[in-house]
Image (cartoon, rainbow, N blue to C red):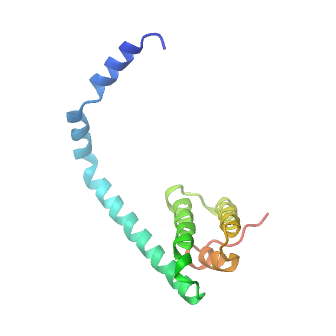
Amino acid sequence: MKDPTRRISRWTAKFTPTRQAETLAVIYEDMAKRYAAATVALCSMESQVKQVLDQANVHTNWYVSYLDYARQLFRLSHQMEVSGSSLALAAQVLLDRWVARGLDANVLATIRQEVFNIGPATT
């Protein structure tokens, strides 16, 4: 970096609160719609996971860990848009990680299959 003062002054000129407010005003409505849709999908997924946990007679002390596993799968399948065999392999890695943390592999596999419709990884 030859001249840090020049770089700072150019950034200060570009990044102003009024310019940021104008940009945000343009995209706010679309952001709000996408956030609402993602929140509905996440809440629906969590409800489905809780049903699986109820059916498997998992003690409520473990719900947080199982929900964290499910949120990681949700992030993979929705936000990162991983699919197919790559998603199955990533889901298997997550399952193995959470089994190592003390969760039941059968319950995790049920969540993976029933809630996310992800089959076991084929290697």
Depicted 98 relative to depicted 2: above or below: below
Depicted 79 relative to depicted 12: above or below: below
Depicted 94 relative to depicted 55: above or below: above
Depicted 55 relative to depicted 70: above or below: below
Q: Residue at x 56, y 83 (%)?
A: 59
How far from the left and from the top, in percent, is residue 82? 59, 58
Q: Residue at x 27, y 22 (%)?
A: 13
How far from the left and from the top, in percent, is residue 107? 64, 79
> How many numbered marks appear?
0
**Dividing the picture into quarters, in which one does residue 95 lie?**
bottom right
Quarter the C terminus occupies: bottom right
The residue most toward the front is 61
How far from the left and from the top, in percent, is residue 49? 52, 78
**Dividing the picture into quarters, in which one does residue 38 lie?**
bottom left
Is residue 40 shown left or right of residue 46? left
Q: Residue at x 42, y 11 (%)?
A: 3
* Residue toward you, 87 or 55: 55
Is residue 53 shown left or right of residue 44? right
The residue most toward the right is 123
Is residue 43 shown left or right of residue 91? left
How far from the left and from the top, in percent, is residue 98? 65, 67
* Residue toward you, 109 or 54: 54
